[in-house]
Every structure is written in C-alpha cells, then in structure tokens.
C-alpha cells in the first residue's frame, strides 16, 4: 500500500490519541503529534506522561511533539477544569465532562498550524460514543468546509476511530505501552487519582477488553 505524506495528530496523552499516533504510520510517511495547552488543571501531569509515551514508542516517521498555547481560563471562568469547582466523580454522567467547544478550539488552531506548514491532514481520536455536539460527523464535515474556505486551501479532518468504541481501540493498541498514557482530570501527584469520571472510564475500558491495567491509581474505585 502506498502511504500518504504528512498527517498531524491532536494528542492529549489519553489512550485513543496515543494509539492513533502509531496507527497512522501505516498510512502516512510522517506523523506529527500536536498538543494544545489550554491551561487546565491536569495538563502538566498529562504532558509529562505523553512525553514518556512518545519516547517509548519512538519509531521512523513519528516526529517530535509540537506544543501550541491556547489559554482558556478567561473563557471557561469558574469551571471545574480550571480548578475552581468540584471535579466530576466516578459516578457522574459523561455529560458532566463536557468542555464547551474544545474540539472546535483545538482543531481550528491546529489546522492553521498545519496550513502554514503544508500539512494537509489533521487527525483526532474521537470515538463513536463521544456525546458532545462538537464531536459529531456533521460538525466535523462543516468545520472542514469552513477551514478550507477560511484558509484558502483544504485541510482534511480525519477521525479514524469515529465508528469505534474504546474497547475496539484498546484491542488495536494492545502491544503498546498503554500504562504510560494518561486519562485523569484530577491527578494525585504524578498518578491517576482513581476517583474521577475519566479514571472510572479508563478502568472500565481495560476491564471490558480483559487487558491488564498497569495504570498507577492513587485510590481504589468506590465500586470495584
């Protein structure tokens, strides 16, 4: 199979985008990971995990990490993600995890970066189960059109996992050091807190697939 040229990947340090960085090497000659720093309360720990993961999976075609700045505290205000409210616990619904317009902001900034460097494809690790309005196919189709018009040149927005569930992606990345990925919104030191909504989702994902979860959690779940 002939591989394409370059693709940028919006990485967060989580399981999906971390696996995507490696998976796309089968389709593209070069993969460029991009981390957009919003200034949210978990990002320092998340970024440290991401750097370790990218070092561990280093291989030809996977380039170094690019970090873009997109401060959001003045927009989000008194939101739990900025450290000004209670973080959603493991028993809260996924709706409580919404960061309004996050994909819109991430994608717009990264797309301009790509355009200025001649990178014509930008990938995200969104899953079929993502419930938020800026994660739908309709949203990304419209955004791709708007970005192309706004930049005067096409940027393809790719969502290779868009029809998949977390279990499917975990199986695809079974040979990767997934214990180095990071999914927590209230880290305890350098560890996952073990008590937030994202930690519960992470535990469930590994459990559903029957994979060993080597994540270091600070606490045990309320319901084992």
Image (cartoon, rainbow, N blue to C red):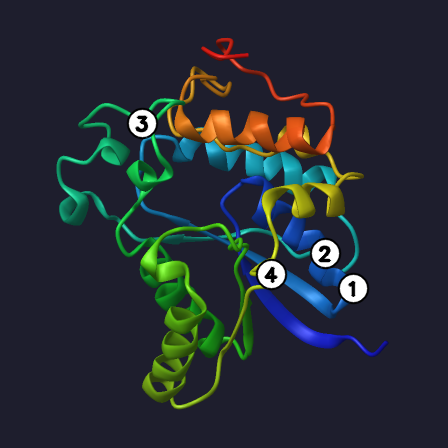
Locate the N terminus by quadrant.
bottom right
Between the residue at mark 1 and the residue at mark 2, the CA separation in whole angstroms equals 6 Å
Query: Viewer-proximal residue, 97 or 65?
Result: 97
**Residue highlighted by disc 3:** 88
Above-or-below relation of 6 to 169: below
User: Which of the two labelled residues, at mark 4 and mark 2, occupies the earlier sequence position?
Assistant: 2
Between the residue at mark 4 and the residue at mark 1, the CA separation in whole angstroms equals 14 Å
* Within-10-Å neighbours for mark 1: few <14, some 14–19, many 20+: few
**Residue highlighted by disc 2:** 23
Residue contact between numbered discs 1 and 2, judged by CB atoms under 8 Å = yes
Q: Position of residue 120 (x, y in %)?
A: 55, 78
Above-or-below relation of 45 to 116: above
**Residue highlighted by disc 4:** 32
User: Which of the two labelled residues, at mark 3 and mark 4, occupies the earlier sequence position?
Assistant: 4
Name the residue at 19% across, 26% down.
85
User: Image quadrant of residue 30?
Assistant: bottom right
**Residue highlighted by disc 1:** 26
Q: Nearer the viewer, mark 3 or mark 1?
A: 3
- Left or right position of 36 against 223: left
């Amino acid at each position: 199979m002939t591989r394409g040229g370059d693709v940028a990947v919006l990485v967060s340090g989580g399981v999906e985008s971390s696996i995507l960085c490696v998976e796309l090497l089968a389709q593209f000659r070069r993969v460029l990971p991009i981390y957009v720093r919003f200034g949210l309360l978990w990002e320092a720990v998340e970024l440290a995990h991401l750097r370790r993961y990218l070092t561990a999976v280093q291989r030809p075609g996977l380039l170094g990490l690019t970090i873009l700045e997109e401060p959001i505290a003045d927009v989000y205000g008194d939101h739990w993600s900025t450290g000004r409210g209670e973080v959603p616990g493991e028993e809260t619904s996924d709706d409580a995890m919404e960061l309004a317009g996050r994909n819109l902001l991430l994608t717009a900034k990264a797309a301009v970066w790509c355009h200025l460097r001649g990178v014509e494809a930008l990938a995200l690790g969104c899953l079929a189960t993502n419930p938020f309005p800026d994660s739908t196919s309709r949203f990304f189709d419209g955004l791709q059109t708007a970005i192309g018009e706004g930049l005067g040149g096409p940027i393809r927005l790719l969502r290779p996992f868009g029809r998949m569930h977390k279990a499917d992606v975990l199986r695809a990345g079974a040979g990767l050091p997934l214990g180095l990925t990071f999914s927590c919104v209230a880290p305890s030191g350098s560890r996952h807190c073990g008590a937030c909504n994202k930690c519960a989702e992470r535990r469930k994902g590994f459990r559903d697939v029957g994979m060993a979860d080597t994540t270091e959690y600070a606490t045990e779940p309320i319901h084992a």
